[in-house]
Image (cartoon, rainbow, N blue to C red):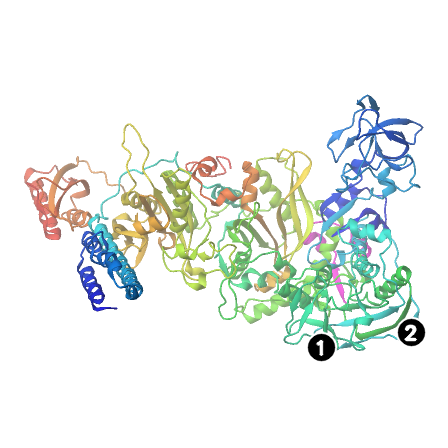
Amino acid sequence: MTDDLASLQAETETALAAAADLRALDAVRVGVLGKSGSLTGLLKGLGAVPAEQRKERGAALNRLKGAIEAAIEARRVVLDAAALDARLAAERIDVTLPPRASAPGTAADGGIHPIARTMEELTALFGAMGFKVAEGPDIEGDWYNFGALNIPDHHPARQDHDTFYLPEVDGKRPVLRTHTSPVQIRTMLSQEPPIRVIVPGRTYRADHDATHSPMFHQVEGLVIDRGITLGHLKGCLIDFLRAFFGIADLPVRFRSSYFPFTEPSMEVDIGWSRKTGELGKGGDWLEILGSGMVHPKVLANCGIDPREWQGFAFGMGIERITMLKHGIPDLRPFYEADIRWLRHYGADPLAPATLHEGV
Amino acid sequence: MKFTLSWLRDHLETDASVDDIARTLNAIGLEVEGIEDRGAALASFRIARVIEAVQHPNADRLRHLRVDIGDGRELSVVCGAPNARTGMMGVAALPGEFVPGTGITLKAGEIRGVKSEAMMLSMREMGLGDDHTGIVDLPADAPLGASYVTWAGLDDPIIEISITPNRGDALSVRGVARDLAAAGLGTLKPWSAPKAAAAYKAPLNWKIEDPRACLWVLGRAVRGVKNGPSPKWLQDRLVAIGLRPISALVDITNFFTFDLGRPLHVFDVAKVKGTNLTMRMARDGETLTALNGKDYALTAEDGVIADEAGPEALGGVIGGEHSGCDETTTECFIECALFDPVRIALSGRRHDVRTDARARFERGLDPAFLPDALEAATRMIIDLCGGEASEISEAGAEPAWKRSATLRFERVASYGGLDLPADESVARLERLGFTMQARDAASVTVAVPSWRNDVASDLSAYRAGGGALAQFAGLDPARAAKAAEGCAAIEPECDLVEEVLRLGGLDAVPTVSLPTSGVIPPAAFTPKQARAALARRVLAARGMQESVTFAFMEAKTAALFGATPDALRLVNPIAADLDQMRPTPVASLLLAASRNAARGFADVALAELGAAYRDITPDGQAAVAAGVRHGATPRHWAEASRGVDAMDAKGDALAVLAALGVPMAAVQVTADAPGFYHPGRSGVVRQGPKTVLATFGEIHPKVLEALDLPGPAVAFEVFLDAVAEPKRRKKGAPDLPAFQPLRRDFAFIVEDKVTAEALLRAARGADKALITDVALFDVYRGKGVPEGSKSLAIQVTLQPREATLTDAQIEAVADRVVAAVAKATGAVLRA
């Protein structure tokens, strides 16, 4: 670089450093790169340079132009940030001021999400049967989500779970719980039987299409006591389903099935019409939940002697029963927070689910 | 798994209808996924003969047929098919019949002056394929007038069932038949292996180099085979269940897989290098080109079948391409092996290979059914492909699977809820193949059949299905031992109870409502859970729409809102923008507000009760009641619309805290909110120096820019875990003085930096006995107030208790207020 260019660069950099605000910065830019700016002048004068030096001189000028533009941009970022800081400082308010006496909206504008509403109803109905609500973390250890529930690493059932994993810690991969069943384990480890809990909560599976969401909600039920039989399981679920859907004679069918953590296991269907979607009528069956007597291994894994205690567990999808109850056709909008959908399906916050007012 | 009704009837003597079979399958745990009755829609179509085909007199492209439909009638048919010719046999539909491929019900008519009284059908018109090049051209010996579907064998419904992971035995037509027979739907037909004589010495020998690779294996060669296409009946069966016929040898192995649940593999002897087939673990760097054409890099944990050249099959999972049989094969070697189910499951998953063989081996198959299966397969190969069989080569041994289980009869009622006579329990078990070993009044002990790996599985050396006990590490050892002993004692019995109940259908179990300990149940919620429910209602009642959003989001966006440790980044996210566990629900809600704004709904108020994730421990998941308001308040004649501001968010947060029983007098606000807030317009609500109850404020303009939100936007977080359980004490007596309160207003001029809270606190403290309330009612800057200062006006409520206050007393209190405020804040009374 020739001396004149080097000194132009040095001068410009000094001027930029001295520019205290965006206006000053712009003045520097115009002075160098503007129509009659110093560098612009040199570029214009390129034609007068002898042909054999022109190429080299032109390249040097362009390099300098690039360097100055970058320096201006860098300074602009600094000044922008300073300007923003100054603006934010000037905008400071007294945050200790008491807020307004009333909210910007009213109960009529707001709403309870249908999933939360269903959870409230579940709590009211199972609460009447003596269940308490238990909760657990979304991020679980492998043992809680699988091993303790009699799902060893090689089990074919693991494939059906499409598990989300987090980075390995001490040789083990934490998972996003694939079901609410780990809370069965946490409950049995933290309290002595008899146990009667439901566990509504978020669950996660790596599956995303029209009928599957990577995050969804389940409610788990667990009853451990003396003398609890499969008959109680059936009674409990039929009582719940008929009350929840408000159909006193809702047909309920129990089919033998298999889950690693229950034995015998059964799937539960309710009667509906495939054609109209109407529940309780039509002669078709719709699978709605899985259940069974708690497997002796699951009890023993938690230190409970299965000769003394026995019971049942069940799990169902909260979105599924919500969609059925309210005729909501599509799963995906549940998680999109589309204000139009929320206003349409949201429940009245002043009318919580209570048995005496009707669920 | 799929099978046809006629296939089932090969094993099951039954008159039951398809509907009865489906109902029973559902009841006993073999869930019906679907029934396809291909023939039902075509039942009325009959085989017809074209007596004569001539050119249509008035149309170049049409032909006029005279058709004999077999009942003595001769019909005139106009037809466009180029292949219609005199004397051909085809399929006819008559007026009034529905033609599925066209979607119309046929009507008699006239086409260009010629009567058309029937229709000759193409395959596509019958919905049986895409062939529409011409009408169906049947062999000359097709029976005139007969039902086409019957003649074509299409009146055989296909039943598809899903098999749960415990029922390897039901992954075969015979296994399904056995279950149905046991459930009372017919009789299982006897089956015995037809023998094949050995004519020469086996050309290949089995070696088990590593017992992990294989438990037991039999093999036998057949030489002089001709491996052409398999017969039509076999091809039809495979096609019906969705398999592609390949060649007789391959089709036979597939048939055994589905018919008897016994996967087999056939090697082409000519392609095997050396005279040994070795069961061993794969070596580093070995690969296998499998029958599906894919290459697999094997690991030391994979069991393989190898010859001198290297692995020829991933044992029990998939065969190799190189040594498989094709049309040139003249000598084949049948492999009939037993593998460790766990190893098959892990190998299959490791390489993501899903085959019919793997599905059976990993669930476990009948560990005793190797010699008979090999005999039967040999026989079938000789029958279909010719040739003669070698002697049998064998390695390993039948595992010790024999075991028994005991059922106390009363457990069917006390566990299963069904009162069942002991004889019926025993009969059900016997129908399933359990054999009685001992019986007394209270119990029966049965031998478990070899194919039921799911029953008393811990007692079998051939372990399939469920896992070993996996007790919690922190259990008291004595307690753990007792529980383990109880499990060992009771688990086989639970297996038997399940079998007994299953066969009768669970609908037979009487329902009993759950007994409750009292008429009035205790609260289902803990106090903390009740607080969360209340928070949700408070926010909705303030006009917010409760939302549910994903707990994970794009890491780059999450980073705008707080720490995004790698430990909270999903290893296998479903999408790149859903990989980071969020630091706060505010992030998700702002994204939601942005989506709403993009749809033309900029003015939203969204709340969520959700988690914020700090680390992977249970305590690292914070329960947060969060909310976001964006845009402006509604336009209304009585109240002007305005943009939302930090005080709206503060109002939301304080409303929640107040509802949850937080003593509001003890709450302080500091101006050190997280970085996603506007630094000058946000605050932290604290209770004492350590407890952060909430944050609130306007969103930082940089965050708005990053999320493409026009703004203004405000947010809050209330940390529900931080809210202490309110003290549940009876309220004291109310303060109901006999004297009227009086109210005095004061306006102070203070420096801008003085907070309202400091001034209010000072005023309240001026006379704790007399002053019951202090409220700020005006903030003013401008004319009359010096630059850099503001005027704060408060109303102080004085409550006399003994007597009406005198002017002097009032004056004295007022002086104390002014002095206290001045001392605390440097304020002066506004002139």
Question: Residue flagged by tag 1: what amino acid is it?
Answer: Asp
Is residue A44 shown left or right of residue A222?
left
Within the magenta stretch, is there residue B409? yes
Q: Is residue A327 left or right of residue B812?
A: right
Residue drawn at x 52%, y 60% is: B572
In the image, B139 versus B696, the foreground residue is B139
Q: Nearer the viewer, residue B537 or B141?
A: B141
Which chain contains the residue that carries disc 1? B
Q: Amino acid at mark 2?
A: Tyr
Residue B408 lies in quadrant: bottom right
Q: Earlier in the sequence, mark 1 or mark 2?
A: 2
Q: Which residue is mark 2?
A: B200
Q: Which residues are magenta?
A: B403-431
The residue beneath circle 1 is B210
Quarter holding the C terminus of chain B? Answer: top left
Q: Is residue B430 left or right of residue B343?
A: right
Mark 2 surroundings: few (<14), some (14-19) or many (≥20) residues within 10 A: some
Q: Residue at x 72, y 45 (%)?
A: B34
Residue B47 appears in the rendering = yes
